[in-house]
Amino acid sequence: MTSVSSADIVRPGDGTRLGSGWYPVEHYAGQTFRWAYNDAEITACADANDRTVASLVQLGNAIGASSTKVTIVGNHGDKAGPTTIKAGNPVEMKVNLGPGVSAETFAIHVQSKNLPTHTKDKRTLNFRVLDVALGSSASACANDIVRDGSPLRVGNHWEKYESFAGRSFRWVGNDANVILSAAQNKPFTLEAQVQAGASLGGAPLSIAIRSAGGKTLAVGQPVKLPPFTTPPMYPSEFVQWSLPALPSGATLILHVNSKNVPVPHDPRKLNFRVFDLKIKP
C-alpha cells in the first residue's frame, strides 16, 4: 500500500477510527502521518468482505535499530506476532467477526530502546504510520460511543447521541451508567475519550467510577483545562480507570463533583461529554 495525502492517516469514509496512543497528526513533504510512542490503537469496523486492516509503518530513531518486533493485540482475543518488521513495512490486522460483533480495537506494540530523539522534540518517537485502510464503509461502525464490540452497554443518565462539527458524542450531567454485558474475570482497564463541559465552571474534570452500591472503584486522572479557553475549545483527552474483575450485569457509574453551572440556551447540565468508550485490549 502507499501513503495517501489527506487530513489524517485514516481515509475518509473508511471503517477505521483512531483510539489512544497517537501523537497529533502532522503534514510534511507531501505526507500525512502520526507518530506513536507505543500501544497506539485502531478500531476497525469490518464487513463480510473487508476484514483486514493494513497500515504503512515507518520506524523512528527511538527504536535504536533498523528493525524491531511488533505485536498486535485485539480486544476480542486476536493476537498477531511478535513479527519482525523493517522501516516502511505494511502491518496487517485481521478483524474477528463473531456473533453480534462488527468491530475490533487493536493495540500496536513495538520492542524499543526508547531512545531520545536528540532534537528539541521531547517525544519518544518509536514509529509513525502514514496510512490506515480497511476497505469497509464507515457506516459499518456502530452509531454510538461504544463501537468495538466490547461488552459495554450505555445505561441510564446519558443524553442522546449527537453529532456536531464532525464529532459524535453523548453529554453527561452526572452519574451516567455503563453496564457490562459479559463478565470481566480479571482486572481490566476502561478507557474513555472525554471533554470537559461548561457546567464544571472551569474546574478540572475528574471522573470517578462507582459501583451500583456507591463504592468508588477508581478515579481517573484529572483533565486540566488550559487558561483563557471557552467551552468549545476545551481539549478532549483519553482517561483510564483500572477496575477489578466484575460479573456480567455489573453497573459502572461515572460520577463528577461539579458546580453544575447553568449553560446559556441549553436546559441540560453539561459537565462532560464522551466521544468513545471501550475496554482496552
Image (cartoon, rainbow, N blue to C red):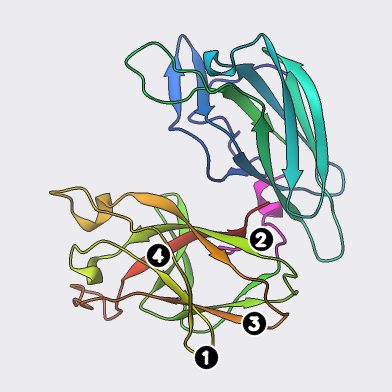
Give the CA separation, mark 2 to mark 1. 30 Å
Marks 2 and 1, the one that precedes in the sequence: 2
Of circles 2 and 4, which is in front? 4
Indicate the secondary structure of the residue bearing disc 2.
loop
Q: CA distance from mark 2 to mark 3?
A: 22 Å
Task: Determine whether, in the image, residue 121 is placed left or right of residue 110.
Answer: left
**Start and end of the magenta stretch?**
136-150
Inspect the image, locate mark 3, and give the three-letter code of the amino acid beneath it: Ala
Give coordinates of residue 261: x percent, y percent. Answer: 19, 76
- The residue beneath circle 3 is 250
Helix, strand or loop at label 3? It is loop
Residue labelled with disc 4: 273
Please name the residue shown 44% across and 19% down the image.
27
Which dot, 2 or 1, sits closer to the camera?
1
Viewer-nearest of discs 1 and 3: 1
The reply to whether dot 4 and dot 3 touch (C-beta < 8 Å) is no
Residue 254: x and y in percent read 45, 75
* Residue highlighted by disc 2: 142
